């Protein structure tokens, strides 16, 4: 009889224990939104709880406020502010229960001046009032797991074994977490290796930028060398023709560019019509076969000749510019001016290659490459147009000239000219 | 759009890039805000993120939170925007003072504006990111994305999808002004239509990841280079409509007019088509295992 009463009593205690979390959670609340603001003069904690409750504690330039009410003033950098900042820095990554526990465990430094101490007490009370139920809720959640596991078993056994089971669950979670973290790290390393292997060393951050920038720069310098040598050959063997083209490009750049643009647009139709024309004339059939590659060879030569001529004009312009270092340029030496001109025309690309070595330079590099493209296209069109206008330098093209009085004489470029 | 939008981005960011050196010269009032929001429901959300300049990071979080955001910005010029109204979440920094100073907020130790966002995997979301200049590192792996739009001006941006998207995206859009832009594990984005509009810069797209369906990637490129990393087992097709664009790495592809196919196009489980519309630049295709 006595034994059965004890059993009933224990069962009743067990049920009471099971119902306890429900009772507590009805009173408890959760942190819905947390905001921590830290600046040179501001250290602010703002919490929003379920049921629209909130807590705001602000240190702003020495003024301390709790829930919008000024509770006092301190000297900026006071020990209380330092302690408050340190608390907030430690709470940045915590949420809900652990956050509430950390905030509740905080206490102001000892030995504060009486006025500052009263501010500290106000803050502690505000934290206590707002967060106690959050902590209770968190603790309730922690004990719910073992209770639910043991509801089918013996109540006395439950009360005895709970701490052991808790320890076991903790151990199990620790082992599982460790394994999970290990696996994640392994996976990340694997991904990183894959990424490096895939990009073939091209995307290895700054070093990748340095190599690609340097290779590109060397490429441009080689291009200048090759074009410069071709320019030298052209100047050597076609001196007066190149002179004529360069003069036309310099004297009538707009007209040359328009003719060049028109010529470029007409290239394909001329090539096709030329081929068809030769094809339908019986004598021209063998020529038609040769026409196909020969036409583009001639066009390429015209473009290169025009470009080199424009480069030469640019080089002469630089020589005449009077800049400090330009006195070394021998204007009488055509090869000299061609090289300088090529440098000028490709300058934007060269700077882009150098800048691309630096991090976060994508935009500036893009702008420089765009500028370089515009310069190259313009120079090519002007050069090609000048070649067409002068019939490859065989006919001198008249253009605007400036007389000594500064009045423009209209020759070929103006209406009725030419 | 699209080039118009790209040009606007280019213009704005040209000013940002040119005037940003002013930034380092002035004393900054830097503020760090860390904020988080508990996950209360799993209704779909429209998430808008706006950040003008600095370092942007976005990654997933598993801590019962809707988001956790760490923001560092110059309080003299910006104020944070943190707004959850109904199913709309708006996070960002808003300019409150004119002028270009403070835009990057660099301090003497090289730290500048920062926007470090962690987003839940539990809530389906339509994600819109507008990022001006700086560097961006996004890991969208495992998020539940129903839509995606990423806009950037002058930046170094790297977006990776390290785990499959839990939802399906009908259209993902990337608008890029002048940027070094990398997209990794694109297959895991689970999008059937991907649109990339780029002004100037370099694009690097890795078509790895787990493709759930066939997809079309439309690339509209101004001036720059495009590098495509294509898994060997993926059916791949490149349709090229470009002017002055050089092609590299096409040896393993079959050409028919302006279209290049991978050899396994008819047999592959998943096929991806890249529609390229470019003005000036280079395209490189690399096969990967």
Image (spheres, helix red, strand yellow):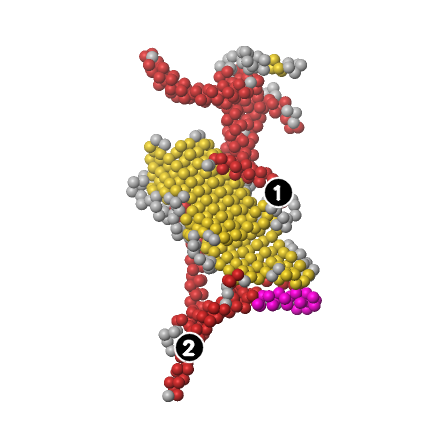
Give B110 or A333, whichever is nearer the viewer.
B110
**Helix or strand or loop: what does disc 2 sit on?**
helix
Output the chain of dot 1. Answer: B
Q: Which numbered dot is residue A295?
A: none
| Marks 1 & 2 on one chain | no
Give A352 or A40, whichever is nearer the viewer.
A40
When the figure is inspected, residue B214 is found, relative to residue A142, above or below; the finding is above
Taking the spot 44% from the left edge, 57% from the top edge, the residue there is: B41
**Helix or strand or loop: what does disc 1 sit on?**
loop
Dominant secondary structure, magenta: helix
When the figure is inspected, residue B230 is found, relative to residue A384, above or below; the finding is below
- Which residue matches tag 1? B98
CB under 8 Å between discs 1 and 2: no
Q: In this picture, which residue range is highlighted in magenta?
A: A110-129
The quarter of the picture where the C terminus of chain A appears is: top right
Horizontal placement of A277 versus A264: left or right?
left
Q: Quadrant of residue A70?
A: bottom right
* Residue at the farthest bottom position: A1
Output the chain of dot 2. Answer: A
Taking the magenta stretch, the answer to whether it contains residue A122 is yes
- Which residue matches tag 2? A14
How crowded pointer 2 is (Cα within 10 Å; few <14, some 14-19, many 20+) is rated as some
* Residue at the farthest left position: B267
């Amino acid at each position: 009889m006595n034994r059965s009463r004890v059993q009933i009593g224990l069962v009743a205690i067990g049920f009471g224990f099971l119902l306890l979390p429900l009772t507590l959670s009805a009173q408890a609340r959760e942190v819905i939104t947390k905001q921590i603001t830290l600046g040179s003069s501001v250290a602010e904690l703002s919490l929003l709880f379920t049921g629209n409750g909130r807590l705001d504690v602000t240190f702003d330039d020495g003024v301390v406020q709790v829930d919008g009410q000024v509770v006092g003033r301190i000297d900026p950098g006071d020990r209380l502010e330092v302690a408050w900042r340190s608390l907030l820095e430690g709470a940045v990554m915590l949420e809900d229960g652990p956050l509430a526990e950390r905030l509740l465990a905080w206490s102001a430094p000892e030995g504060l001046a009486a006025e500052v101490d009263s501010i500290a007490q106000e803050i502690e009370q505000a934290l206590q009032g707002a967060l106690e139920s959050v902590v209770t809720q968190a603790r309730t959640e922690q004990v719910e797991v073992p209770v639910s596991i043991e509801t089918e078993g013996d109540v006395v056994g439950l009360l005895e074994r709970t701490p052991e089971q808790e320890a076991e669950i903790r151990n199990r979670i620790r082992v599982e977490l460790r394994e999970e973290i290990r696996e994640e790290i392994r996976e990340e390393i694997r991904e990183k290796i894959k990424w490096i292997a895939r990009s073939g060393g091209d995307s290895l951050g700054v070093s990748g930028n340095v190599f690609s920038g340097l290779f590109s720069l060397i490429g441009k310098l080689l291009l200048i060398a090759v074009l410069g040598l071709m320019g030298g050959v052209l100047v050597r063997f076609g001196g007066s023709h190149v002179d004529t083209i360069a003069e036309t490009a310099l004297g009538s750049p707009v007209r040359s560019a328009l003719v060049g643009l028109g010529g470029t647009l007409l290239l394909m139709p001329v090539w096709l019509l030329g081929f068809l024309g030769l094809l339908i004339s019986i004598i021209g059939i063998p020529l038609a076969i040769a026409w196909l590659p020969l036409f583009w060879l001639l066009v390429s030569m015209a473009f290169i000749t025009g470009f080199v001529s424009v480069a030469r004009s640019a080089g002469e312009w630089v020589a005449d510019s009077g800049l400090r270092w330009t006195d070394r340029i021998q204007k009488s030496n055509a090869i000299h001016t061609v090289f300088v001109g090529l440098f000028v025309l490709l300058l934007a690309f060269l700077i882009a290659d150098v800048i691309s070595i630096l991090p976060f330079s994508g935009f500036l590099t893009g702008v420089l490459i765009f500028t370089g493209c515009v310069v190259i296209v313009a120079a090519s069109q002007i050069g090609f147009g000048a070649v067409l206008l002068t019939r490859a330098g065989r006919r001198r093209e008249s253009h605007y000239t400036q007389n000594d009085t500064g009045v423009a004489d209209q020759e070929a470029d103006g209406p009725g000219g030419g | 759009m699209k080039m118009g939008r790209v040009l606007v981005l280019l213009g704005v960011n040209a000013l940002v890039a040119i005037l940003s050196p002013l930034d380092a010269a002035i004393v900054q009032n830097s503020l760090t805000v860390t904020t988080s929001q508990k996950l209360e429901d799993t209704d779909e959300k429209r998430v808008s993120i706006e950040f003008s300049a600095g370092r942007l990071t976005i990654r997933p979080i598993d801590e019962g939170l809707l988001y956790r955001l760490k923001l560092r910005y110059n309080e003299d010029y910006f104020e944070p925007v943190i707004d959850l109204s109904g199913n709309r979440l708006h996070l960002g920094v808003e300019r409150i003072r004119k002028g270009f100073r403070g835009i990057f907020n660099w301090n003497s130790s090289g730290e500048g504006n920062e926007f470090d966002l962690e987003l839940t995997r539990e809530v389906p979301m339509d994600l819109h990111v507008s990022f001006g200049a700086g560097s961006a590192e996004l890991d969208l792996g495992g998020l539940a994305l129903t839509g995606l739009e990423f806009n950037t001006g002058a930046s170094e941006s790297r977006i990776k999808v390290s785990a499959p998207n839990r939802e399906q995206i009908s259209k993902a859009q990337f608008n890029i002004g002048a940027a070094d832009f990398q997209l990794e594990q694109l297959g895991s984005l689970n999008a059937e239509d991907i649109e990339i509009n780029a002004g100037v810069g370099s694009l690097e797209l890795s078509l790895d990841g787990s493709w759930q369906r066939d997809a079309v990637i439309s690339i509209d490129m101004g001036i720059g280079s495009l590098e495509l990393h294509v898994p060997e087992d993926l059916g791949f097709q490149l349709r090229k409509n470009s002017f002055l664009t050089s092609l590299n790495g096409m040896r393993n592809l079959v050409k028919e007019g302006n279209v290049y196919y991978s050899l396994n196009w008819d047999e592959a489980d998943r096929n991806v088509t890249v529609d390229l519309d470019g003005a000036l630049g280079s395209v490189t295709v690399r096969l990967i295992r």
